[in-house]
Amino acid sequence: PSLRKHLQPFLGVNFTHKVPQTIIIGVRKGGTRALLEMLNIHPDVVVAKAEVHFFDWDENYRKGFAWYRAQMPASLPSQVTVEKTPGYFTSAKAPDRIYSMNSSTRLLLIVRDPAERVISDYTQVLYNRKERHKAYEPVEDILVRNGKLNSRYKAVQRSLYDVHLAAWLERFPLHQIHIVDGDLLIADPLSELQRVESFLRLPPRIQPSNFYFNQTKGFYCLQSAGRERCLDQSKGRPHPAVNGTVLAQLCRYFRAHNTNFFRMVGRTFRWCL
Ligand code: A3P
């Protein structure tokens, strides 16, 4: 089945482009790329490799569903098409727009410790600025202003999972949103992928042999269709050491939001200990 999947663009028969039945909506830096690539191991899944930004960018949304469909890979009728755009989770327009395309779309949301996510988000921007030889501020200076936590920092806002999820729950019932534990996806990808297979009602096809731990990268890498590969170097970057007092301040700020999120999704995560 996996060979057929890789040959399908060349076979051309019975293949169509479908809008996704499943969308990874975020969260940015939660492990969205890893989740998409891992799900792509499944023979009944096809994925859009690039982030499509259809529902969050007006200039793309205006191009219409035919354009959106054309961004998707060819698939067999039995296959599930998946796209991921982490910007959807924090977009005010995305929930309504996805709902009006197909109210039964299944959503995948991958979350990780919100404080860790802030540092990851900062690290991404830091690397981009360093590459372009631009000035950058230490994370502590951005996070704390006049002794108070700078809650207006975008990376902090993006980690308010309860606030963003509330907008999705106005449209979609919780049973249509599967929460993936991004910290667990790092430590034990197979168990998280098996839960996703079951949520998507896919036959269990992802195996222990599809993952191997790469000491150099410090993360699990993938093995499928006779190929081994790790995610690129922009995934799994070392984070700067952050002052403990600032981290504690960040955790304190997230505490009530986290508790609210746990209540909304009916489960808890070991965050900000
Ligand atoms: P860091 O680079 O901060 O470690 P996204 O794809 O949503 O931008 O998420 C990036 C994060 O995916 C990385 O953040 C990393 O921790 C996480 N990740 C999860 N599984 C991974 C894997 N197998 N290889 C590399 N990164 C992985």
Image: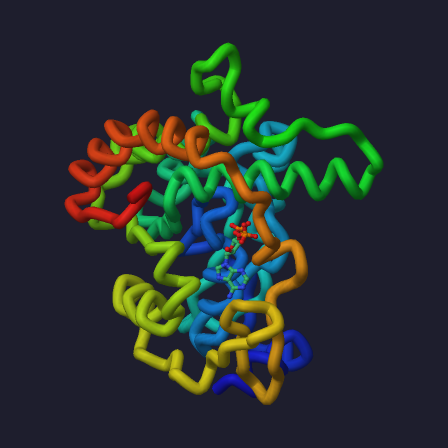
Q: Position of residue 54 (x, y in %)?
A: 56, 40
- How is the model colour-coded? rainbow
Residue in the foreground of this view, choosing between 68 and 186: 186
In-image side of 201 versus 44 (left or right): left
Q: Residue shown at 28%/66% (left/top)?
A: 195
Q: Is residue 107 something that shows in the picture?
A: yes
In-image side of 143 versus 262 (left or right): right
How many numbered discs? Answer: 0
- Which picture quadrant has residue 57? top right
In-image side of 265 versus 65 (left or right): left
Q: Residue shown at 39%/79% (left/top)?
A: 206
- Which picture quadrant has residue 188? bottom left
Residue in the foreground of this view, choosing between 189 and 236: 236
Q: Position of residue 186 (x, y in %)?
A: 43, 63
**In the displayed structure, would residue 78 be above or below residue 146?**
below
Q: Residue shown at 43%/51% (left/top)?
A: 23
Residue closest to the far top: 146
**In the displayed structure, would residue 265 be above or below residue 237?**
above
Residue closest to the far front: 244
Q: Residue shown at 61%/42% (left/top)?
A: 123
Quadrant of the drawing holding the C terminus:
top left
Residue in the foreground of this view, choosing between 61 and 220: 220
Residue closest to the far right: 133
Q: Position of residue 130 (x, y in %)?
A: 77, 40
Q: Is residue 46 something that shows in the picture?
A: no
**In the displayed structure, would residue 91 be above or below residue 101?**
above
Q: Position of residue 162 (x, y in %)?
A: 29, 32
